Structure formats: C-alpha cells, structure tokens
Image: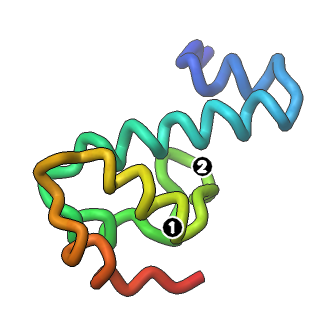
Amino acid sequence: GDHSPYVLVKARCGREVRDTFGRLSQFALLLNLDRPADVMDFWGVKVNGMVWQLTADELRKVMALRDDFKPDEIQRLALTT
C-alpha cells in the first residue's frame, strides 16, 4: 500500500494533527516559490490532496519572511477567498 508520510498521518492521527501538517506543508511551499506571483498556481485549490488552509493574511505574512520578495509584489496578489 501507499506508505507516504501524508497518508500515514491521515490514517493514524486526528484532524488537528493533519491540519497542522497541512499548514506546515503550505508554509514550505510558499517559502520555496521563485516569485510571489507563483502562489496563484496554488491559491484556493487542492495541493497534493490538501485543501488550502492559510488565509490571505497568513499567506502574505509567510511570504514577507522572504527578503527577496518585495512587499508591494506581495500586497498586489489578488487573493480572494
């Protein structure tokens, strides 16, 4: 069977733990983007079977951790819920 970490966590842990891992995965995805606009490829869609869990404000805060992302580029993102 499928023994990927996500599948094992999903099968053996409660919703709270899965949600935490989902949020952490999304943090990592954001921190690995090449440019702020690339988030639009993922925003609001399922990523690896996970529903996007971060709010627009949280997403902007995480992206602001990147020194190479300009604040005005992050603010211009059309992130609707």
How many numbered discs sit on the rendered protein? 2
| Residue drawn 11% across the image and 51% down it | 68
Judge from the rendering whether residue 76 lies leftward or rightward of residue 73; answer left or right. Answer: right
- Residue 55 x, y percent position in the rendering: 59, 65
Q: Measure the C-alpha gap from mark 1 to mark 2.
A: 8 Å
| Residue drawn 49% across the image and 36% down it | 25
Which of the two labelled residues, at mark 1 and mark 2, occupies the earlier sequence position?
Answer: 1
- Residue 64 x, y percent position in the rendering: 32, 55
Residue type indicated by callout 2: Met
- Residue 46 x, y percent position in the rendering: 54, 59
Residue carrying label 2: 50
Residue carrying label 1: 45
| Residue drawn 52% across the image and 70% down it | 56
Is 10 rendered above or below residue 45?
A: above
Image quarter where the C terminus lies is: bottom right
Judge from the rendering whether residue 73 lies leftward or rightward of residue 16; answer left or right. Answer: left
Is 17 rendered above or below residue 2?
A: below
**Is residue 15 or residue 37 the one in the foreground?**
37
The image quarter in which residue 9 lies: top right
